Amino acid sequence: MTAVTLTERSPGRRGDAFLSVQDLHVSFRTEDGVVKAVNGLSFEVERGTTLGIVGQSGSGKSVTNLAILGLHSKEHTEITGEIWYGDTELIGPGGRTMERLRGNRIAMIFQDPLTSLSPYHTIGRQISEVYRKHKGASKAEGRDRAIEMLQRVGIPNAKIRVDDYPHHFSGGMRQRAMIAMALVCDPDLLIADEPTTALDVTVQAQILDLLRNLQQDFGTSIILITHDLGVVAHTADNVMVMYAGRAAERGTAAEVLGAPRHPYTWGLLSSIPRLSSSVDVPLKPVRGTPPSLLNPPSGCPFHPRCDYPQLAGPELCFTERPELSPETGHADACYLTLKQKQETFAKIKETL
Amino acid sequence: MLRFLTRRTLGATVTLLIIAVVTFFLFFAVPGDPARLFCGKICTPESLIQVRHNLGLDQPIFVQFVQWLSGIFVGRDYPAYGHCPAPCLGYSFVNKEPVFDAIIDRMPVTISLTIGAAIIFLLFGVSMGVIAALRQGKPLDKIASVSSLIGASVQIYFIGTLAVYFLVFQWHILERPQYVPFTENPLEWASGLLLPWIVLAVIFTANYTRMTRSTMVEQLSEDFVRTARAKGMSQRTVVLRFALRGTLIPIVTIFGLDVSTLIGGAIITETTFSLQGIGRLSIKAVVDSDLPMLMATVLVAAGAIVVFNVIVDALYAVIDPRVRLS
């Protein structure tokens, strides 16, 4: 690990964020050409906070987080940019360095707890092997720790259930076991990739509460990937909206959800069904289809689906790609002036 | 587990009985008179009748079948040859010895041939498949698929004969194939069978390489394998403990089939290498119209398949805990 910790800090690196991603590009070589899944993404996560990453399928949310863990196959993926975890650069080292971090300092919870747990090993074994690998614990210590973790995530009869296989568990219990597995080494950073998508609503709330409590107790930073704005509103401190492998908007949860500035965020908010509205009001989807990542649109990647390019001035949105600005705080990548954004959203807000 | 085994043993017995009935009656459906063969070249009508009586061939077919079947459990008395103790599979028309003794005599040859070859092709096939899966599209993967294609295309009597000619007679690298009992001299047992093992393995390995490769590629893209990586498990652990586990299911399936077929008699292999195993015994029984011998070899072959089916089913439960539910 020493060789990596000695790597010089990038001059472009801002502040002392606990996790800092700078100008990340991830592309895959496929038979049809190069898919640019992430295009110059930068963000930071502070210690003990939750960053919610929102965006539709294919916007690069999961790809970004798999890159943080170094889980992309080296042969088919090209990753450039910088990912700093404290003083450790996570792009490049691979092998042992990443093995020591994964599951230990940085852990991940996957979307589908049914397929993400090994059907061939007991729950206890799958939890304890992480602890034994990273902490050098004995078999008995690993087992005790697994029972402790299962109790912590609220599995009843943990002492007995520890010897069960995943197929003996319900969906919610499997996700709890998955969380227990991710937290067994008390990681600093937890990446939760749509942790509640496969679960029903009551279980969803329980799982989110569990994550929040664990964060309060252990000061873990969380990256929560989701397409559910409700989940973000309840759990995230900061929010990043992703579109076509880039950040469209970023800020605190209150800023992004309360006073959104990017037309795509407006679209996302408008497409949420309201319990208070009458049932025959049709949902308003974001019109058009997500952009092809093989041939991304010119200019602003959102312009083919945007209702306001004429406001920003002729041709600007079609030819030049807007950058995320300002550098810190509530920022968005759109050419509209702040005043235009505020006025337009005020109109949209009435229909929400 | 006990219930599973009882049920399967019962099923196996019924299967074997049905196979015995079919074989027995098929034998009488084909033309040819075993008594005439048995009697030899100079055969008077009187001695033919005598022979027929001695072999019990003058009885109705059903009576013969019942006699044969009861012989297995309680033994049987032959007027001309004396008592044949249980399990009596009959007297060979041709060798004039109890069939059971012949089977017991030949069985070790076939089992030795099978075990050695099976170990080699299982180890090589699976490890080549795993390596090919991990090196998808790389030269090693291509070498593995080309060599397994070649292996799958050749025939034993072709490469077996070539191997004997070059490796034994021309270059003197390997010993001439022969069978020395393991209990007599383990070293000679192995060196005598090495050539047949290798040749058999060349042909069988291909199947295992292809099967392992394709299943392994699927398994490596499973979510739980990605989870294992995300947990910080080493590449070795990820491959051997997680991805290989699911790959074992189809491998165990074809392994059970292959081994049971070989135990039933590797006819061509035994003939190519002049080994006196069950395979040659059975082919000789067919040529000689030697009914008791034929019945015995068929039962051995069928028994091997039935037994390995049960073993394979039990192994499924060991490999995959989800199978244990039902």
Image (cartoon, rainbow, N blue to C red):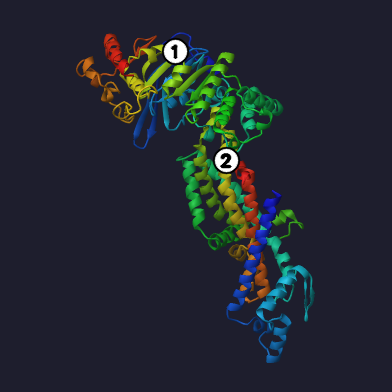
Does the image show residue B149? yes
Amino acid type shown at disc 1: Ser
Q: Residue at x 46, y 21 (%)?
A: A231
Nearest the viewer among A241 and A104 is A241
Name the residue located 54 percent from the left edge and 31 percent from the top edge: B227
Between B258 and A154, the residue placed more toward the observer is A154
Residue B275 vertical placement versus A241 (above, below): below
Tell me: A43 left or right of A325.
right
Q: Residue at x 49, y 45 (%)?
A: B214
Q: Secondary structure at mark 1?
A: loop
Q: Residue B144 location, x and y as percent?
A: 50, 46
Subunit ID for the residue under disc 2: B
Residue B306 or residue A224, whichever sits in front: A224
Res B174 seen here: no
Q: Amino acid at mark 2?
A: Leu
Report whether A135 appears left or right of A284.
right
The quarter of the rendered structure image containing the C terminus of chain A is top left
Mark 2 crowd level (few <14, some 14–19, many ≥20, 10 Å Cα): some
Residue under mark 1: which chain is it in?
A
Image coords of residue A51 (percent x, y):
46, 17
Residue located beneath label 2 in the image: B244
Total number of numbered discs in the rendering: 2
- Percent from the top left, x then y, of residue B236? 58, 34
Name the quadrant containing residue B19.
Answer: bottom right
Q: Which residue is mark 1?
A: A10
Q: Residue furthest front?
A: A278
Real-space Cα distance between discs 2 and 1? 41 Å
Q: Where the N terminus of chain A falls, by quadrant?
A: top right
